[in-house]
Image: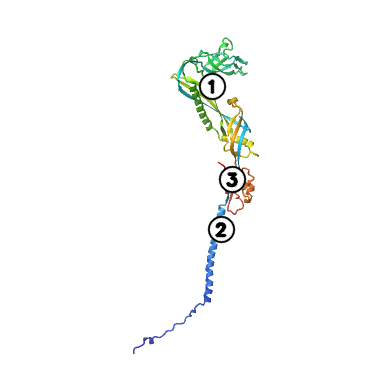
């Protein structure tokens, strides 16, 4: 009979060890364990969220102070005016009243025209002479047509009656300037600068004591065939030369106007008299037309003139700083222009008319100093202290701040001046 191997196997007992209670958890036990573990995880997660939120709030709070400040956009006060003012001005830039400076600039234009025909012409040379009186302290009087003998041997005549003042007590000769004309026509009377004696004084003690010297050359003497242009061609040429001269001189004057001054386009006058126009024949059958002139302009201090206009046209104006952007476009009209001697004018009366805006100038520095540290709620009341401001917009950062910054560098001021 086969041996059963299993029967020979003996169970060996090992030392006993405490056995875990392998009893399954009851439902109550599981819920108890679960309730002890889960809140620990949630609490940890909420703490992280809370710390992050606090950090973000702190960061935003810090950044808000880092970028804190105020921005004010100002619109200045603007008023429309229409003026028609009669004003006066004095040639004295140091006076407190309205004044003007006189701009003086001279020019010359020349044009050569082909002659259309020839004529027999005889013209006398003319020039200017200074007469001297070193005889005594009494004046010497001579009638028009007094003959003067030039050092070139030619005789000339004074055009008007003349009076030569006597010597001064210090012995300085009295002087007077006179215009002369050659006794006869012809080129031989034309001359460079020469000396003169008065023919009627010859043989007297005054002959060497009362004398003359040229101030200008003697020119214009001619006798013979004269190239001729029609009166229409001459007038056309003269008008063209005047227009060209005025344009060139006006540009020169305009380029030289200093900042802060105004030259109205109607306050410029070109002075050309008959003596400054010459029509001279040339040997090549052409005629030279020459025009000389002087441009006078009345220059005004813009600030003084602006204040004068404001005083007459703005109610309750109290010398605030303003400007008139279209002031140069006002129409200027000089009163009694025909009777004014531009070379020695001292006072003028004129009319100024037109329409424009008047814009007040905002003092940004003063305004900033006036709002430093002030309450935001007082802003509208503060604006009333600045009549130059028409309206304003305010932004303060961060939005919850109730007052302006204490430092001016934290305040940005923008002034939107009208164009």
Residue 76 vertical position relative to residue 103 in the rendered view, above or below: below
Left or right side of 220 for 3: left
Residue 70 position in % (x across, y down):
58, 50
How far apart are the two marked residues, 3 and 2, measured between alpha carbons? 34 Å
- Write down the residue under mark 1: 274
How far apart are the two marked residues, 3 and 1, measured between alpha carbons? 59 Å
- Write down the residue under mark 2: 58
Q: Please tell me the numbered disc located at residue 237.
A: none
Mark 3 or 1: the one toward you: 1
Mark 3 or 2: the one toward you: 3
- Write down the residue under mark 3: 74
Mark 1 or mark 3, which is nearer the start of the sequence? 3
**Quadrant assignment for the C terminus:** top right
Residue 284 position in % (x across, y down):
43, 19
Residue 230 vertical position relative to residue 15 in the rendered view, above or below: above
Residue 271 vertical position relative to residue 51 in the rendered view, above or below: above
Label 3 sits on a secondary structure element that is strand
Q: Outermost residue toward the left?
A: 1
How far apart are the two marked residues, 1 and 2, measured between alpha carbons? 90 Å
Mark 3 in CB contact with mark 1 (< 8 angstroms):
no
Front-most of 201 and 173?
201
Mark 3 in CB contact with mark 2 (< 8 angstroms):
no
Q: Outermost residue toward the right?
A: 316
Residue 307 position in % (x across, y down):
62, 36
Q: Outermost residue toward the bottom?
A: 1
């Amino acid at each position: 009979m086969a041996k059963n191997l299993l029967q020979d196997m003996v169970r060996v007992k090992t030392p006993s060890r405490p056995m875990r209670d392998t009893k399954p958890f009851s439902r109550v036990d599981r819920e108890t364990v679960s309730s002890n573990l889960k809140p620990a995880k949630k609490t940890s997660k909420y703490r992280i969220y809370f710390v992050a939120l606090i950090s973000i709030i702190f960061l935003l709070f810090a950044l808000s102070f880092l970028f804190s400040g105020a921005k004010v956009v100002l619109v200045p006060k603007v008023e429309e005016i229409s003026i028609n003012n009669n004003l006066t001005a004095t040639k004295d830039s140091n006076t407190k009243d309205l004044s003007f400076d006189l701009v003086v600039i001279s020019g010359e234009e020349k044009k050569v025209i082909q002659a259309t025909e020839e004529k027999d012409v005889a013209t006398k040379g003319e020039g200017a002479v200074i007469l001297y009186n070193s005889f005594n302290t009494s004046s010497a009087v001579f009638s028009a047509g007094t003959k003067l003998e030039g050092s070139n041997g030619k005789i000339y005549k004074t055009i008007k009656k003349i009076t030569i003042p006597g010597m001064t007590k210090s012995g300085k000769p009295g002087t007077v300037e006179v215009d002369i004309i050659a006794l006869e026509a012809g080129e031989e009377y034309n001359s460079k600068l020469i000396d003169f004696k008065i023919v009627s004084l010859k043989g007297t003690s005054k002959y060497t004591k009362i004398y003359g010297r040229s101030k200008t050359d003697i020119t214009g003497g001619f006798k013979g065939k004269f190239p001729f242009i029609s009166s229409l061609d001459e007038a056309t040429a003269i008008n063209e030369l005047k227009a060209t001269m005025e344009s060139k001189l006006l540009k020169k004057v305009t380029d030289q106007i200093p900042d802060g001054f105004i030259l109205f386009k109607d306050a410029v006058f070109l002075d050309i008299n008959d003596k400054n126009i010459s029509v001279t024949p040339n040997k090549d059958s052409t005629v030279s037309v020459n025009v000389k002139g002087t441009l006078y302009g009345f220059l005004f201090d813009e600030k003084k003139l602006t204040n004068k206009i404001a005083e007459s046209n703005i109610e309750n104006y109290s010398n605030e700083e303003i400007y008139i952007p279209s002031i140069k476009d006002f129409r200027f009209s000089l009163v009694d222009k025909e009777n004014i001697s531009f070379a020695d004018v001292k006072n003028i009366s004129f009319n100024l008319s037109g329409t424009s805006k008047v814009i007040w100038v905002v003092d940004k520095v003063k305004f900033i100093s006036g709002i430093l540290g002030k309450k935001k709620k007082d802003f509208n009341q503060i604006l009333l202290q600045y009549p130059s401001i028409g309206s304003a917009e305010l932004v303060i950062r961060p939005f919850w701040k109730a007052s302006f910054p204490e430092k001016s560098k934290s305040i940005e001021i923008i002034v939107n001046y009208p164009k």
